[in-house]
Amino acid sequence: MNKNLIQARDNIIESAGRTTQGFGLGRIIGQLYALLFFSPKPMSLDDMGGELKVSKGSVSTNIRELEKWGAVRQVWIKGERKDYYESEVEFSRIIKEGILPFFKRKIDSSFVATSESKYLISDGPNNLKPGDKELANFYTERLELIEKAQSRLSLLLKFPGL
């Protein structure tokens, strides 16, 4: 393969890894998706691990997550016993069916933590010293800001146009 083609593909693979890592999803998950996206043929776990220089176990774990999101799918190749995968190329489908529900679960989890914290603060205001009351009020104000942001983000994730 031409050196420029290899470099162009590798640049995208590395950028995808940095992007997913920046979102807290891990570097390999982005690299795997980009590798499959730029592969004209389905790839096995061994092929992907070899290309990315990572373990087959790491590839397997991350490919399962990509499958949950609908970002990749397993394909059957006649005469082969290995599992092969190819990427979904419709980004809006991956976003709607995989990434947004993933982030919604994360936000729902943060709603629970926020509610628990508000309950803990409101549970014992009479037992607080004057300095602690001020801190409790400050925490409550901050938790209310978090709740507003969570609500806005929750609405955004339900936006049908995405």
Image: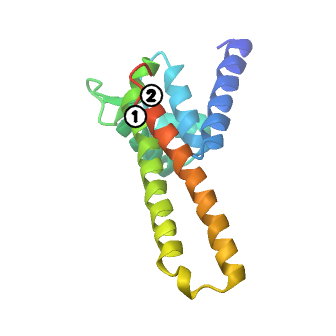
Q: Quarter holding the N terminus?
A: top right
Residue in view at x 53 percent, y 39 percent: 29
Name the foreground residue: 43 vs 137: 137
Name the foreground residue: 11 vs 83: 11
Task: Give, as a three-letter code, the residue at label 2.
Answer: Ile
Q: Are marks 2 and 1 in contact (CB under 8 Å)?
A: yes
Say which residue label 1 marks.
98
Q: Within 10 angstroms of label 1, few (less than 14), some, or many (20 or more) residues? A: some
Say which residue label 2 marks.
95
Compared to 64, does 30 lie above or below?
above
Q: How many numbered badges does the structure rendering display?
A: 2
Q: Secondary structure at mark 2?
A: helix
Name the foreground residue: 14 vs 82: 14
Which colour style is shown?
A: rainbow
Q: Is residue 58 visible?
A: yes
- What number is the disc on residue 5? none
Q: Residue 6, image x and y in percent? A: 68, 19
Residue in view at x 42 percent, y 19 percent: 161
Query: With 53 as the anchor, is 87 left or right in this view?
Result: left
Q: Residue 145, image x and y in percent? A: 60, 51
Task: Give, as a three-letter code, the residue at label 1.
Answer: Gly
Residue in view at x 69 percent, y 73 percent: 134
**Based on the displayed image, in which of its 4 quarters is residue 142 positioned?**
bottom right
Q: Within 10 angstroms of label 2, few (less than 14), some, or many (20 or more) residues? A: some
Residue in view at x 64 percent, y 34 percent: 19
Name the foreground residue: 103 vs 137: 137
Q: Secondary structure at mark 1?
A: helix
Compared to 156, does 145 lie above or below?
below
Q: Residue 152, image x and y in percent? A: 51, 38
Query: With 72 as the anchor, is 122 left or right in this view?
Result: right
Whole-Å distance between the Cαs marked 2 and 1? 6 Å
Q: Quarter holding the C terminus?
A: top left
